[in-house]
Image: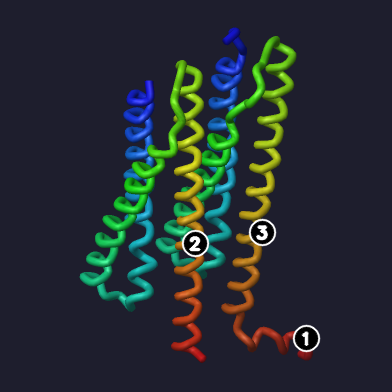
Amino acid sequence: MNTIAYIIYLLITYLITVRVGLVFFRNGRIFILGLLKDDVTLTDAINRILLIGYYLVNLGYAALMISTWSTIHNWMELFLSITVMTGKIVMTLAVMHYINMLVIYFISKRNKTILHP
Amino acid sequence: MERTLNFTAYLIYLPIVIFLTWYVAHTLFKNSKVFMQDIFNGKTDIALATNKLFETGFYLINLGFAFWVMEITHGLLDNRDMVEALSTKIGGFCVNLGLMLFLNLYLFFRGRRKAKARYTPLSATPKIEG
């Protein structure tokens, strides 16, 4: 039973990670562009590297969490544990996302005070 | 192990919380574009990008929380048990959603106030004297 759970779980986390990653990739570009003072080639390079790093961290974390899984006896436990584990992963993603936005906010604030004292 | 109603409760719980999250996020972030335009002083592209990022964060944190707290630890033996457990879960989730909504609204109002203070020219103040 555990193998089925792992397969479904990895599929769901993969879909969520890739989808959310693409949203961040598209919408985060403009912020990096602003921070690097309209240097387009460097922005695209950094953005792509950040996307790869994001995938690595999240999928690696999702795969690591499998080792903490308890044994599954019936379909209800399968359903329950998949949902709870996915919830944990998504919560972690959300916390990381908010930290990232805070970092961007503080960096842009600092740049403004340096440029316009 | 005797048969319990937990699985039915989960099947009812999940669609309700997903629908609630979608509805609240949809309403909030459809209307927050006005705030974003004000905050970024009419720069539409950066305003829409920020809006989308906040929307994604809202979905992630609320759905993650909803999935995380789904487990009902005691066995539900009859319908009354199930309704009581479900109403506690869904009610708690609604309160959480409301708190998140007001937190986001507070952030929007705060950003708007700061942006207004930044972009208002100083020459606007002597209007009181003249």
Residue holding disc 3: B106
Q: CA distance from mark 2 to mark 3?
A: 18 Å
Circle 2 sits in a helix, a strand or a loop, which is it? helix
Q: Which mark is nearer the camera, 3 or 1? A: 3
A37 over A103 or under it: above or below: below
- Nearer the observer, A53 or A37: A53
Q: Position of residue B59 (x, y in %)?
A: 51, 44
Is residue B130 rendered to the left or right of residue B42? right
Q: Locate the C terminus of chain B by quadrant.
A: bottom right
Question: Which chain letter matches label 1?
Answer: B
Query: What residue lies at 70% left-to-right and 36% top-to-bottom?
Result: B92
Of the residues shown, which amino acid type is indicated by label 3?
Tyr
Q: Position of residue A15 (x, y in %)?
A: 34, 38
Q: Residue at x 48, y 81 (%)?
A: A110
Q: Which residue is mark 1?
A: B128
Which chain hosts label 3? B
Q: Which residue is mark 2?
A: A99
Residue type of the residue flagged with mark 2: Ile
Between label 1 and label 2, give the one nearer the viewer.
Answer: 2
Three-letter amino acid code of the residue under disc 1: Ile
The answer to whether the residue labelled 3 contacts the one labelled 1, judged by CB atoms less than 8 Å apart, is no
- CA–CA distance in space, label 1 to label 2: 43 Å
* Label 3 crowd (10 A; few <14 / some 14-19 / many >=20): few
Task: Determine which quarter of the picture holds residue A1.
Answer: top left
The image quadrant that residue A65 belongs to is top left
Chosen colour scheme: rainbow
Q: Is residue A42 left or right of residue B26?
A: left
Compared across the picture, whether B112 is left or right of A45 comes to: right
Q: Residue at x 68, y 51 (%)?
A: B102
- Relative image position of residue B31 (x, y in whole percent): 57, 49
Q: How many angstroms separate mark 3 from mark 1 (CA)?
A: 30 Å
